[in-house]
Amino acid sequence: MAADLFDYDAELSRYNARLRAAADVGTGDRVLDIGCGTGQTTREAGRSAHPGSALGVDLSGPMVDRARRLSEEEGIHNVSFERADAQFHRFAPEHFTLGISRFGTMFFTDPVAAFANIGSALRPGARLVQLVWQADDRQEWSSAIRQALVGGKVPAGLGEDTFSLADTTVAAGVLTAAGFTAVDITEVREPIYYGPDAVSARDALFELRMVKDLLADLDAAATARALDRLLAMLDAHDTGEGVWLDSGAWLVTARRH
């Protein structure tokens, strides 16, 4: 992975397979990928959609730049990427036949407006297929990292956006208010991957905002102790085939009215 980008593709490999199966991109589809990151899901959608196309949007300029480079390197010419906020971006109306997102829809300031905007880009009857995190207390990765670094204390506001759609009633209500129908929510549990060994996993975690925030108020000595505890926790989760921590998500599907 790039030195300045956490490898979310590796972390979420098990979930990626779940999303790909649920999305079931078909030949000729025009796919909108929301929160595409470095574009793995967009590229996979493009391959399956050919001669259709896929557009990936993300707020991160470095991730979008890398997505473009990887697409060029892999010779995938029916995908494109834009640095854009899906809540406000003016998509071509009723252009896309399918919307997908791998943990990219939890961060909107106004989720109803955001999903309404996304819906306006989908054809009537088109599906939206997304993965969102379950609640914080169902995430071993969150609790174990937090426990190691700060004894389990949760700084005010930490991670609230990450779990904003964790309540299934809220998630269904947001989509319905935004004009979607046939909302279906299914539980998915998969481990997530942090590296081939504890040291690599610890080093990778330095790229996560959550870890940076948890360490921000610690002095040098406390930081050193916290990192020792983190390394010990990660070592305990080394399966011999990498460091894996448990997690839970919702697979949410809906149709544009």
Image (cartoon, rainbow, N blue to C red):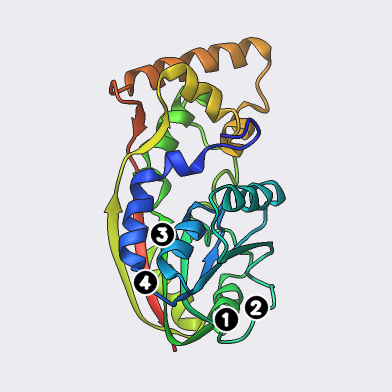
CA distance separating discs 2 and 4 = 21 Å
Q: CA distance from mark 2 to mark 3?
A: 22 Å
Helix, strand or loop for disc 1 = helix
Q: Say which label, 2 or 3, has the lower sequence index.
A: 2
Please tell me whether mark 2 or mark 4 is closer to you in this view: 2
**Quadrant in which the C terminus is drawn:** bottom left
Q: Which callout, 1 or 2, points at the residue further toward the start of the chain?
A: 2
Q: Is mark 3 in CB contact (under 8 Å) with mark 4?
A: no
Q: Looking at the image, do the residues carrying marks 1 and 3 touch, with CB atoms under 8 Å apart? A: no
| Foreground: disc 4 or disc 1 | 1
Q: Earlier in the sequence, mark 2 or mark 4?
A: 2
Q: Position of residue 148 (x, y in %)?
A: 46, 23
Labels 2 and 4 touching (C-beta < 8 A): no
The three-letter amino acid code for the residue at tag 4 is: Thr
Q: Are marks 1 and 2 in contact (CB under 8 Å)?
A: yes
Q: CA distance from mark 3 to mark 4?
A: 9 Å
Which residue is disc 4 drawn over? 253
Residue 31 visible in the shown view: no
- Foreground: disc 2 or disc 3: 2
Residue underneath mark 2 = 91
The residue where tag 3 is placed is 131
Q: Amino acid at mark 1?
A: Ala
- Which of 33 and 228 lies nearest the eye of the viewer? 33
Q: Considering only order in the chain, which callout, 1 or 4, is on the residue closer to the N terminus?
A: 1
Mark drawn on residue 121: 1
- Category of crowding for the residue at label 1, using alpha-carbon neighbours closer than 10 angstroms: few (below 14), some (14–19), many (at least 20): many
Residue at point 57%, 84% (across, down): 120
Tag 3, which secondary structure?
A: strand
* Spatial separation of the CA atoms under disc 1 and disc 2: 6 Å
SS class, disc 2: loop
Quarter of the image with the N terminus in it: top right
